[in-house]
Image (cartoon, rainbow, N blue to C red):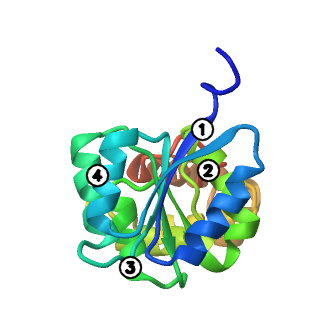
Amino acid sequence: MDGVHSRIRILAVDDHPLVREGIAGLIGVQTDLELVGQASSGREAVQQFRAHRPDVTLMDLQLPDMSGLDALMVIRNEFSDAKVIVLTTYAGDAQIVRALKAGAQGYLLKSTLHQDLLETIRAVHAGRKNLSPEVSYQLAEHMTDESLTPAEILVLRHIATGSSNKQIADQLSVTEETVKGRVKNILAKLGLRGRRDL
């Protein structure tokens, strides 16, 4: 496979030209990434996706005519393997949780695009979910189907701070086996493969 075809093909969807230009600038200098399309509305995003079939789509949630969440659902309905990273202005956006439940694999704050964009695109393309600790908490607390128990949420919070199973067991006054069981349940409920994803 030559270098051109092994590039990760990206569609950028945002109604602000400056954001799209910033994304184009970051991607343009990377040898393994290629911006194949841009859209400024939800409907345009769906059309561009159908036309280009990108590997990864960056989707703003606040779009004119059709929200990013609706566009994401249309795309995921047609293309179940579509990989979408949602873009948002602030971490407390309740729509992030809905977008992740609708199939988005990651999210990025616009304020940290220049730091996190490239790493997040590569991680999602490789099949990993990419979430910040804040969103992981929100997701854990808002999961309606198979929601996490309060005990599992506690374990998840400790994992997010980097604690080992043994440290978590000591802090919660339970056995290490109990912690392992809770970690296994959390992974199953959130559809994640391993502790690193958590």
User: Which residue type does callout 2 highlight?
Assistant: Ile
Q: Earlier in the sequence, mark 2 or mark 3?
A: 3
Image point (25%, 66%), residue name: 70
Residue at which label 2 appears: 121
Confirm whether residue 109 shows in the render. no
How far separated are the C-alphas under marks 3 and 1? 25 Å
Q: Secondary structure at mark 4?
A: helix
Residue 8: quarter of image: top right
Q: Is disc 1 placed on a helix, strand or loop?
A: strand
Q: Distance between the Cα atoms at labels 2 and 4?
A: 21 Å
Q: Give the numbered dot on residue 47.
A: 4
Q: Which residue appears at 38% of the width and 81% of the height?
A: 94
Label 1, label 4: how far apart the Cα atoms are: 19 Å
First-in-chain label (2 vs 4): 4
**Separation of residues labelled 4 and 3 (CA atoms):** 18 Å
Crowd tier of the residue under label 4, counting other residues whose Cα lies within 10 Å: few below 14, some 14–19, many 20 or above: some
Secondary element at tag 2: helix
**Residue underneath mark 3:** 62
Amino acid type shown at disc 3:
Gln
Percent position (x, y) of residue 182? Answer: 51, 54
Look at mark 1 in the image and give the residue it sits on.
8
Q: Amino acid at mark 1?
A: Ile
Q: Nearer the viewer, mark 2 or mark 1?
A: 1
Residue count near mark 1 (Cα–Cα under 10 Å), binned few <14, some 14–19, many ≥20: some
In front: 40, or 182? 40
- Say what secondary structure mark 3 lies in: loop
> Residues at badges 4 and 3 in contact (C-beta under 8 Å)?
no
Of circles 4 and 3, the one toward us is 4
Residue 165, given in percent of the width and then of the height, sits at 70, 54
**Alpha-carbon span between mark 2 and mark 1:** 8 Å
